[in-house]
Amino acid sequence: MSDVSEPTSTRKRGISLSDAVAGLGVTFVLLPQALAYAELAGMPPHHGLYAAALPAIVAAFFASSRYLQTGPTALTSLLTFGVLATFATPGEANYITLAGLLALIVGVVRIVLGVLRLGEIAYLMSEPVVMGFTSAAGVLILASQLPTVTGVSAPSGDVIAAALWTLSHPNEWSVIAILLGAGTLALMQLSVRIHPLFPGVLVAVVLGVVYSRFVGFDGPVLGAVPGGFPQVSFDFPWQALPQLFVAGTVIAIVGFAEAASISRNYATEDRDHWSPNREFVSQGMANVASALVNGFPVGGSFSRSAINRQAGSTSRWSGAITGVMVLAALPLVGWLEPLPRTILGAIIIGAVTSLIQPKPLLRLWRYSRPQFAVAVVTFGLSILLAPRVDWAIITGVMLALGVHLWREISLDLDSRYDPQTFTLHLTPRGVLWFASASKLEEDMLRVLADFPEAQTLVMHFEGLGRIDISGAFVLARFLGDTRDAGLKVELKDVPPQSRRFVEPLLEPERPKV
């Protein structure tokens, strides 16, 4: 349990003025993002603020990384919508309570994984699976926002179908909605070039509200946003627990990959400490807090964590300051009611375009065709099975494990015969374990039969990465049969990690392992 305890490097850091500045700067980005991501998750917009306030405060008490900013994220919101849209109508009371239960499942699973020191499970998703899923998620999120940013009312149903309908009906587009969306994207890009703390997203929201209130906007607007603080509730639809448990576990692991990547990268750059187990607990407690205030699953944000770091955050308490600022803003959110929804759609698009990365996918084709296949299948299934992208992830993970298993079973055997010394050299390459041992035995017997005049057999072991006990017994049987046939046996280049298995093979009896 030692690595779940608070790191010394983190314990020494108190709240500084830089933390306050960084926390405030992140708040300016988080407020509009929380509204947008709530819509992406199928929740009423103000519930995004609930998921942004208390979870960030709670996460700070357990966090390992001093930069990680916790709250609603695009990927987690997409996964949430994908799971819940098949059980209830987005935005309705039943949907909201199911979202709370889903967040509770995510939180408890992460806490258990952290307490049991199973942080390494965050690496269960291979890079090809992550590449395929994140690119597909980017495509799906962009498609889901196309009707919003063009100001049209597309037929409800499949996200891709609605996007294609929108693209095929340009006569339905609203020029004003498109201009407001384009202006929002421009401000988001401009803010990056001006300064990390320049709140381009917030400026776009303020300008949108001013335009809608004083000039008039005839398209969809945010509408009524209840002010005040969230109510703590333990009223969950427990009867839905069996149906949501698997999906919640998937979100707990998949969603944590983002937080783990942020923490690991920044810890490496700063030569600082971070604990995946502690971060699991931190993110788990944040999700439990989100569940109690009618929120939805949350995670670590790449964009907001980057702003937090660039703004000079010195401790994990900058995240708590962000949560407190969001909490303080809750009674004042009523002024957002005239906000054009096209601006929220543009905020989402601007945040997720970086998810679509075709170049790394294409590089996989050059490096490994099987891994490329894993990425492509994960990508394709994520699109085809939407909104249930969690099943696409599960399939991708299983396929990646299958490819790994296939590679482990595929053990090669190189052979060379020296006719002058009547010596047969055999060099197996790969991993010798119970699944590959029988195939190796067949190949060795076949090669031995091809050279009946051989008098000496030399086994070279430098090509074997690992040998398990089943592989050792198979080798013992083969070498025993070879000795019985009158051949002299020599073992060469035995790796140190395999000596306890291989050296007993020189004896006539089976290895004592």
Image (cartoon, grey):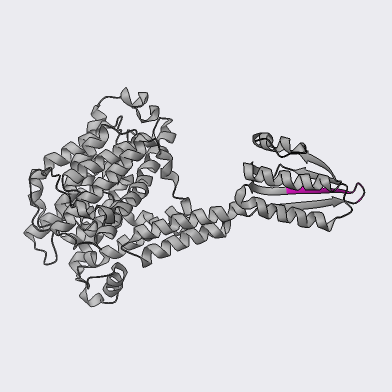
Residue 132 pos. (x, y %): 43, 58
Query: Between residues 6 and 163, which one lies in front from this camera angle?
Result: 6
Is 18 magenta? The answer is no
In the picture provided, is 67 more to the left or to the right than 481?
A: left
Quadrant position of the C terminus in the picture: top right
- Outermost residue toward the right? 420
Res. 310 in view? no
Q: Nearer the viewer, residue 90 or 52?
A: 90
Q: Residue at x 44, y 47 (%)?
A: 124
| 396 versus 480 height, above or below | below
Q: Classify residue 53 by image quadrant.
A: top left
- Residue that appears at 29% across and 67% down: 159
* Side of 252 where 438 appears, left or right: right
Q: Which residues are magenta?
A: 419-427
**Residue 470 locus on image (x, y percent):** 63, 45
* Front residue of this view, candidates 308 and 408: 408
Residue 322 place in picture, x, y as percent: 21, 38
* Residue 163, quarter of the rendered image: bottom left
471 vs 181, left or right, is right
Verify whether residue 423 appears in magenta.
yes
Q: Residue 495: where, in percent of width, then height?
A: 68, 37
